[in-house]
Amino acid sequence: MAGPYLPLKTGARGLKVGLARMPPKAREAEHARLVRELEAHEYRYYVLDDPVVSDAAFDALMQKLRALEAEHPELVTADSPTQRVGGETRPFITKIRREHRMFSLDNAYSPEEMLEFHRRVALGLRDGDTATFTVEPKLDGASIEVIYDSGRLAQATTRGDGAEGEEITPNVRTIRGVPSRIPHTGKLTLRGEVLIFRKDLEKLNAERDAAGLERFANARNAAAGAVRMMDPREVAKRPLRVIFYQAVEGPQVRPTHSETLKWLAELGLPTHLREKVTAWEGVMDAIAAIDRARADYPFETDGAVVKVDSFRQQDVLGATSKFPKWAIAYKFPAERAITTVRSITVQVGRTGALTPVANMDPVELGGTTVSRASLHNADQIRELDVRVGDRVSIQKAGEIIPQVLAVEARSRPPGTEPYEMPKECPVCGTRVVSRVREEGKPEVEATVRCPNRQCPAQVQGRILYFASRPAMAIDHLGESLVDQLVTKGLVKDVADLYDLTAEQLTELERMGKKSAQNVIASIQASRERTLDRLVGGLGIPQVGQVAGRQVAQVAGTLETLLGWSEDELREHIGGIHGFGDKMVDSVVDFLEDEAERAVLKKLLDRNVGRPQPREVVATEGPLLGKSLCVTGVLTRKRDDVHALLRAAGATIHDSVKKDTTYLVAGDKTGKTKLDQAKKYGATVVTEEEMDRLLAGEGLAGA
Ligand code: AMP
Ligand code: ZN
């Protein structure tokens, strides 16, 4: 397992003696030596998971390298370990057409389909030529291609559409464990998967919770989003890993895939080294072994990949337009578990909506222990007829919060009652109002709401919404802090945030002096946000960030917005492109409401919100005259996507309307949005298809 850089010589020799006076050649050699040593330690830490020095010793070495580079900037190279923090933000990402297409994998879900695969392989090979197979875990992340040239990391790209990917070299340079140099002189083209390990995702999510940011639903989304970010410094902050699973060019050094993987490991590259080589008879056993072991893998695995081991045979078998014929992915069934519902509690959201949650006996599911499942709304509880005491089967399909699939009604204990939504808000006790699902209107969701706007749960929700990233982006204002602020009565509305002092905060639980100062600084800094973020963060019904921005555009300042009479309001807001009557009413009602006005006046007095800069409207572009709505989780930030679309001439809306041309649907797109798209005849497109539209290419096959 020892890589070429091992064993390590630790402890630097006589560095203290006058670096500056060292002759240039010696400085260069010293620099190269430090780089090698640091990379060897990174290899032990990130690839072998077997460090030989303490974190402090590692940091000290890094410090030495930094000092040397600070004194002699000419020594800094793009691939120096000091550069792992990432360089400048890039204005755009270039597309690169690759020499060898990146394929996806054909899937099999049953032993029968695997037999079918084997039959095709046998038919494809000449008589009497039998194949040996490798079986390896299917890594669930984002695939990339990395090219080494003359021993240096030269280029990294995303998979894109296979033939063409996006250049992400600066991002991949920040990933620890990916060596910037390898002891191999020829060109070497590798395929690998960018991943986030489970324990790293937990940590990352805990940090995001603390910062009041949305959690990542799964490691795949977090990894896929990160590799494509424009700012390598942000990428460097994500705990990314790469595992290489294939060499495309250069492997001719070794005749088989499995030997190539070993060779890659010898070069110091991270590979999973868990592959098993076997005749066909052993393939299903090897798959079963991976299935048993995968809960202990540090990363998520949703299947096993079976490949014909010999490169010669791979060449004979070839590929279809989409898949290589010499490989297949066996997908494990989605993970399910059975447990018992102990209670059903209700959460109250920002808008007052009551969401039931099933609290269950803790059970292992996909490597984590789960004890809660969201039941979404009263409709879903009724449809499933979930009752306290029921045994239920739950499933996790990528998301962190599992779903209740079905109820084992037969084993239901006697004497249970169907669940009834509470008649009073569980937080403030106000009588709830409900809207039932209307016959023939599937898009109208049944809801039960607490109508009391002063309800602490709602106040808390509104503040978190106001502070969230797309709105005022107030860092350090996490859920538990806001909870305390509201419960203690320190904050009754969003404007009160700006009166808080560090002294008040230090009296709260788990709040040191330093963090209190940080919170206050973030709050005060947010006064500089432009009006669009402020309006979008108010939580006006039907008005999200996009509509909020449109309102901000016509008003310019908060003062103007508050100064308008009802008639003026109707005139200005009614003139906004895409605002229907309902939306206009909603904005006018909000701005005419005495309580809301009072809060807005308080914000104005506290000098919150900068005037809205006038926007340059694109007068040409492939999407001119088209109206789009973007929803779900995309690989890029929603704001960035909106900016791209606007620059291409598009108009953006928060919801699907009569004149919406395209609905861009990311991961976890809600059913409501899809139903609306159907109703209004909007075309639903994926993020990739949107990129094609932006490039002026039109939709494939359309
Ligand atoms: P799919 O995206 O479902 O078509 O699956 C194909 C993708 O699986 C490839 O592009 C790789 O990114 C990924 N993959 C994960 N693990 C492996 C592996 N061990 N060998 C080959 N591909 C893999
Ligand atoms: Zn309430």
Image (cartoon, helix red, strand yellow):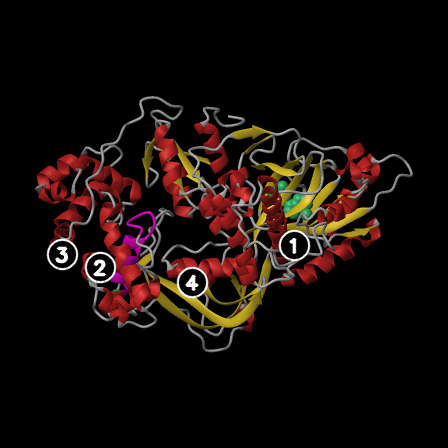
Q: Are marks 2 and 1 in contact (CB under 8 Å)?
A: no
Q: Real-space Cα distance between discs 3 and 2? A: 17 Å
Tell me the quadrant of ligand 1: top right
Residue 242 seen in render? no
**Extreme-top residue of the structure:** 620
Name the residue carrying label 2: 497
Q: Main secondary structure of the magenta part?
A: helix
- Residue type for callout 2: Leu
Front: mark 4 or 2: 2
Helix, strand or loop status at disc 1: loop
Type of the residue with mark 4: Ile
Residue 614 lies in quadrant: top left
Eyeballing the image, is 351 above or below 640? below
Q: Earlier in the sequence, mark 3 or mark 2?
A: 2
Q: Which residues are magenta?
A: 457-473
What amino acid is found at the position of numbered circle 3 in the picture?
Ala
Residue under pointer 4: 381
Circle nearer the N terminus (3, 1): 1
Judged from the image, the secondary structure of the residue bearing numbered disc 3 is: helix
Which residue in the protein does label 3 denote? 595
Residue at left offset 26%, top offset 51%? 525
- Tell me the residue at 48%/47% (across/down): 85
Mark 4 / mark 2, whichever is N-terminal? 4
